[in-house]
Image (spheres, rainbow, N blue to C red):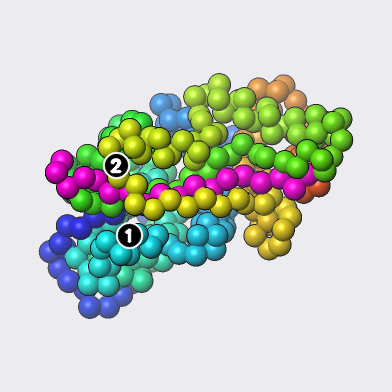
Amino acid sequence: MGNTPSSKRKTKAHIAVEKQHPTSSQSRILDGREYHNEEDSGYLLPKDDQEIDRLHEEHFITKELLGCNIMAAGLKNLDFQAGGLNILDVCCGPATWLCETSLEYPDCQFSGVDMCDLWPQIIRPVNLGFRKANILHGLPYPDKSFDEWPRVLSEIRRVLKDGGLFQCIDLDMRVTTDAAGSSTNERHRSGQLISQVESFCTSKRLDPTAGAKLDMWLSDAGMHILQSEYREIPIGWGGPIGEAYLNIFRGILDGLAPWMKRDLKITDEVYTQRINQTAEYVVSSKAFIGLYAFLTQKPIDD
C-alpha cells in the first residue's frame, strides 16, 4: 500500500460505468471450465464465474477471521481517511477487497493487477483501476510508485515507496487433522486425496506451505514486519465459517480436477467419489488449515 499523493482529490465515492468488452486473456477449456493459458505460470485453478464466486466467499471468510480489510498497523501508520494514497493489490483476482476498500476510502487511488482479468468490467468505483499482467514478468509500474512472494516480493519491494506498507495474506494449505477422531484406515483412505494434491502441487513447484513461510520471506526481502496474525480455519465444522470453508475447499478440489485426474489416471466418477470421501473425512477429523497475515513496511532509507 502506498503513500504517493494523488494528482486529483475525490470528495465522495463515484461509480464508473464502462462498456463491457470481451476478455483478451488467453485461455483454454478443460472439463467444461475455463483456465488460463500462461505457460510459465503454475497457477492451476480456473478463471470462470464459478471460481469468481469461490474467491468472493474466500475473501469474506478472511475478512471475518481478521476482523478487517486493512490491518490495524496499516491504519495507524497511514491516514487513509485523509486520502492521497496509492494502493496496489497484487494478484487481485475478482477484486473483492479492492471494491470494498476503494468505496470506503474514496480519496485514495486503488489499482489491481492479475494475469486473469476477473475484475468487474462494467461497474466499478472511479478511484479503482486494473492492469492485466503476469507478475512473474515484473510489475508494470515504475520504481517506488506504490507502498503496498522470493521473486515476487522483490518486485513488490521495487514498486513500493520508501516507508510504504505491504499487507500480505496467505494460507498454509497443509490440512491438519485430529488423529484421534478417525481410524488409521479411514485416515489413509479418505485423507489420501489431500496428500496426493499436496504432492502434485510440490511437483509443480507450488508450495502449499507458503503461508507459514511468509515471515521468513518477508524478512529476507528486507521488509520490517509491523503486525502479524494467525488464524485456524476449520473445514466443515465449528460453525458457519467452517461450513462455508468446506464449500471453498471442495471448490479447490473441483478446480484441480483436470490435473489430478490425469496425474492419478482416474475417471470423473472416481475423482468425485474421492472428493466426497475427503469432505466427510475433514469434518469427522476436525481438520483445519492455517491463515497467515502480515503488515510490513519498506525501510525509509532504501
Residue drawn where x is 34% and y is 59% of the image: 73
Across and down, in percent, residue 108 comes to 25, 65
Establish if 290 lies above or below 76. Answer: above
Q: Give the residue number, with chain letter if any, for mark 2.
A: 223
Amino acid at circle 1: Gly
> Is residue 84 left or right of 278 when viewed as pictured?
left
Residue drawn where x is 51% and y is 30% of the image: 207
Establish if 37 lies above or below 223. Answer: above
Dot 1, how many residues are within 10 Å of its Cα: few (below 14), some (14-19), or many (20+)? many
- Which image quadrant: the C terminus? top left
Across and down, in percent, residue 156 comes to 29, 41
| Residue placed most toward the observer, 163 or 131 | 163
Cα separation between marks 1 and 2: 14 Å
| Residue placed most toward the observer, 288 or 57 | 288
| Residue placed most toward the observer, 229 or 68 | 229
The kind of secondary structure element at disc 1 is: helix
Numbered mark located on residue 74 in the image? 1
In this picture, which residue range is highlighted in magenta? 285-302
Establish if 284 lies above or below 11. Answer: above
Splitting the image into 4 quarters, where does residue 202 fall? top right
Amino acid at circle 2: Met
Establish if 219 lies above or below 234. Answer: above
Residue drawn where x is 39% and y is 53% of the image: 227
Residue drawn where x is 64% and y is 30% of the image: 197
